[in-house]
Amino acid sequence: MQQIEFIKIVSPFKDKLFRLAKRLLVSTEEAEDATQEVLVKLWTKNETLHELKSVEAMAMTMTKNYCLDQLKSKRASNMTIVHNNYTDNQASLQQKLEDEDSLSWVEKIIDDLPEQQRLIVQMRDIEQYEFEEIAKMLEMNETAVRVALSRARKTIREIMTKTHNYGIG
Amino acid sequence: MALDNIEKLIDKYFEGETSIAEENELKVYFSSPDVAQHLKQYQPIFGYFSQAKEQQFTQEIPLLTKSRDQKRTIVIWLSIAASVVVMLGVGTFMYFESHKSEQFVACTPEDNPELALEQTQKALALVSEHLNTGIESVGYLNEYENTKNKIFKK
């Protein structure tokens, strides 16, 4: 397979890989490294890519596995890197600060979820994959995905309501 | 959109039973400016989901790896070739060196005086050469003599 062809296949979902990696690894730099690593792995496999039904699903699974491995080795060396950056969006300064604050709250809450739930929230609520696809990528069954997702969403709601009420009181 | 509909959707959403289309409906509703007061608390959640999707992977896709692999194999073959050349060189050198010392041929001065003379000279040269290396290594003993002369002036 030629490079151009490969890039054409990869470009539509490379951002998704990156966001998934970032969701798990938190640090942007690490997520970039992970994405590149996965793309290189895909590229070395490029002879067999044609036989795959969905390169995207395969890449997502690879990213998930790579990041979980990274986390495992990171945990062993007991190191945490927290890194946040946000894009600009036009609004009044006050509103913007407030929004940013609550948005970053949501991000923090999601990042505090267990890895499994983080993955599912990322894939469903942000990337909007169907349950069937998520189940395949995570090698789980659909019901388990639904249950984990519902649990994650409820946790987010619970913590959000708490902080919301703190704001009022 | 009707408020009770949205409320129903939210309940379904937290049970994990909404479809992608319904979730999009919720996203649209919460991104609009007029969200009902009691639902405001959910706004950041959906706002964050939309915002998080904007993040992009800006790094280049590293595809040089294949040519890098090719380069690596070239380097490996080059080093193999170089080591073969070096070994051949050392081998031939050793071969000729060992032959040089074996160049003595058995002969008697009666039937081949010239060859005998040559052989003898060679043998003597070999002996003296070895002797000289022996003497050279003892050469530093002269230093003692020099130092002694310096101290004990005659």
Image (cartoon, rainbow, N blue to C red):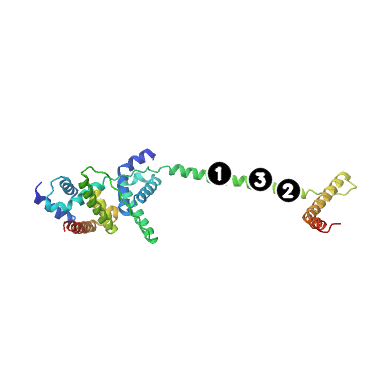
Q: Could you say where residue B54 lies in the image, as x and y percent from the top left?
A: 27, 45
Q: Could you say where residue A162 lies in the image, as x and y percent from the top left?
A: 19, 59
- Residue of label 2: B97
| Relative height, residue B153 to residue A53 (above, below) | below
How many residues crowd mark 3 within 10 Å: few (<14), some (14–19), many (20+)?
Answer: few
Query: Along the line of sight, which residue is nearer the eye, A29 or B75?
Result: A29
Name the side, left or right, on which B127 lies relative to B18. Answer: right
Q: Quadrant of residue B77?
A: top right
Residue kind at label 1, given as amino acid type: Leu
Question: Chain letter of disc 3?
Answer: B
Query: Along the line of sight, which residue is nearer the eye, B54 or B79?
Result: B54
- Residue of label 1: B78
- Residue of label 3: B89
- What secondary structure is found at the residue carrying circle 2? helix
Residue kind at label 2, given as amino acid type: Glu
C-alpha separation, residue under disc 2 versus residue under disc 3: 12 Å
How many residues crowd mark 2 within 10 Å: few (<14), some (14–19), many (20+)?
Answer: few
How many residues crowd mark 1 within 10 Å: few (<14), some (14–19), many (20+)?
Answer: few
Residue A54 can be seen in this image: no
Name the side, left or right, on which A79 lies relative to B78. Answer: left
Residue at screen point 28% across, 59% down:
A114
Q: Give the mark count.
A: 3
Name the side, left or right, on which A60 lies relative to B83. Answer: left
First along the sequence among labels 3 and 1: 1
C-alpha separation, residue under disc 3 versus residue under disc 1: 17 Å
C-alpha separation, residue under disc 1 versus residue under disc 2: 29 Å
- What secondary structure is found at the residue carrying circle 3? helix
